[in-house]
Image (tube, coloured by chain):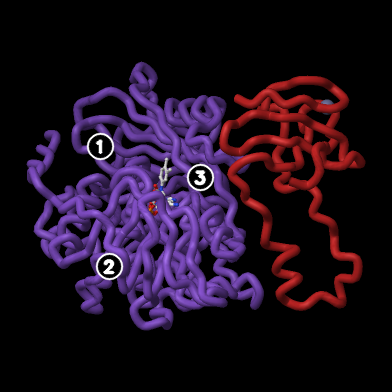
Chain colours: A purple, B red
Amino acid sequence: MTAEPLPEHPDFLWRNPDPERSYDVVIVGAGGHGLATAYYLAKNHGITNVAVLEKGWLAGGNMARNTTIIRSNYLWDESAAIYEHALKLWERLPEELEYDFLFSQRGVLNLAHTLQDVREGVRRVNANRLNGVDAEWLEPDEVAKVCPILNVSSRTRYPVLGGTFQPRAGIAKHDHVAWALARRADELGVDLIQGCEVTGFLKDGDRVVGVDTNRGRIHAGRVGLAAAGHSSVLAERAGVRLPVQSHPLQALVSELHEPVHPTVVMSNHVHVYVSQAHKGELVMGAGVDSYNGYGQRGSFHVIEQQMAAAVELFPIFARAHVLRTWGGIVDVTPDASPIIGSTPVENLYVNCGWGTGGFKATPAAGWTFAHTIATGEPHPLNAPFALDRFTTGALIDEHGAAAVAH
Amino acid sequence: MLLITCPWCGPRNETEYHYGGQAHVPHPESPADLTDEQWAEYVFYRDNPKGPFAERWMHSVGCRRWFNVLRDTATHEVLTSYRLDEPRPGGNR
Ligand SMILES: Cc1cc2nc3c(=O)[nH]c(=O)nc-3n(C[C@H](O)[C@H](O)[C@H](O)COP(=O)(O)OP(=O)(O)OC[C@H]3O[C@@H](n4cnc5c(N)ncnc54)[C@H](O)[C@@H]3O)c2cc1C
Ligand SMILES: [Zn+2]
């Protein structure tokens, strides 16, 4: 294996316009989801009088902080459908956007360490196949063939008893994904406005008619929130309560190494997930901190546990150095599935609750959110993910079911 | 790592505790009378403020008792801790 070269940076990707006084659609948040929504509003629905407002810099939120794992091996039909739609879009996006963001279908292994893990994994493989999602159950010796540096000996504390494998899963260069979407949205006429924080909402009775920002008042026919960890803080200003809790989630990278790690490995039970970036860093994540937080840093003991798990699974990492750690703020729903749809406020739409795993959904989140905003009706793929499922009880309970966070 | 004070055992590391989410969420007095919306509210909706938050913690490897903590979710500052039968310091907001 040799390290793949990174794509060249085009020197000019989007304009930096000042905000107009009014738009057909205002999207709050220029993460991957906000950008994909703007792109599909323009491309699929011909709606180009659109602004994406970003309080910081473009895609500097969770989009810049995630571990970039893309897969669609979710348990429930509703989830499999939307994540598999995303994966199919990922497979054609580099060509469509004419931007090679190094989508690498190197596969994802989800390890099993207990009898219960094994049963859950086999069940999920069967569910995936019924939903047309590629999935295989691998015994420990087959796991070792996919990822030779994994310790599959039976003499570890939590031996590897097997794993599920999705060959079409993989990783992508997250920053380049954002830039690719931003460039194309900009070309189609969308205004991408950085350093523009939404501080409140303009309402006419029960209808939203615009937003207040640190750069003035902006009128809007429709407003879509794609603010990830800050969705509930923002929605509250519009008088909408969301069933989400924000938690810090951390990740870290090592210094550069020779290519040694050919796939993505995730373990729910010992809780670490590892891939090797194109340049050579080992990229690792673990779980969220248990408590609510917006501080963009997490607890050190989470890192300690994740490193202990990583070294047991990959003994050759024992002397690797951590180069950098960071945190993002993710919004988690009670059933660990996203919310995409309308709100009790007319013309205000929300895309949130992706928790620790929304990067992989980026194209499908944008596709379905754009459809919902453009038509006022959910797309069949996001209809089950409406806010009212918490009242009707039609939950899509992916906690644990989908094989680890992300 | 947070330094949290158990009202009975004193200040200990975060790792000694288990988190229990928002404090002061009373069980409905007559559950049979609730609408679906009110049930959803009770079961699924919790505050998620960026700032001071009253929350429950349990001293799981110590005295194993539940208590409340007032913590700033933006700065990580643990403002105070108090027993379950005590009101939230400084009123409700
Ligand atoms: C450490 C970590 C690892 C992760 N790993 C994975 C993974 O491997 N695979 C995966 O699928 N997912 C992963 N995720 C989750 C994924 O990153 C998120 O679910 C996804 O990025 C959320 O959508 P987004 O890209 O639009 O969010 P963001 O990029 O966070 O976009 C939201 C934007 O809204 C802006 N904003 C907020 N409030 C306002 C306001 N008032 N006004 C204007 N702008 C505002 C923010 O600045 C931000 O840029 C991970 C997340 C983290 C933190
Ligand atoms: Zn105690």
Q: Chain of mark 3?
A: A
Is residue A343 positioned above or below A158 on the image? below
Mark with earlier residue (1, 3): 3
Q: Which mark is residue A277?
A: 1
Q: Looking at the image, which residue is at 49% across and 31% down?
A: A306
Using the numbered discs, state the Cα–Cα distance from disc 2 to disc 3 in whole angstroms. Answer: 40 Å
Residue A142 appears in view: no
Residue B60: quarter of image: top right
Residue A61: quarter of image: top left
Q: Is residue A117 left or right of residue A138?
A: right
The residue under label 3 is which amino acid type? Asn
The residue under label 1 is which amino acid type? Ala
Q: Are marks 2 and 1 on the same chain?
A: yes
| Tag 2 and tag 1, C-beta contact below 8 Å | no
Q: Looking at the image, which residue is at 12% across and 34% down?
A: A2
Q: Looking at the image, which residue is at 38% across and 47% down?
A: A55
Is residue A243 positioned above or below A14 on the image? below
The residue under label 2 is which amino acid type? Val
Residue B36 appears in view: yes
Q: Is mark 3 within 8 Å of ligand 1?
A: no
Q: Residues within 10 Å of mark 3 (few under 14, many from 20)?
A: some
Where residue A146 appears, x then y in whole percent?
Answer: 29, 44
- Residue assigned mark 3: A268
Q: Are marks 2 and 3 on the same chain?
A: yes
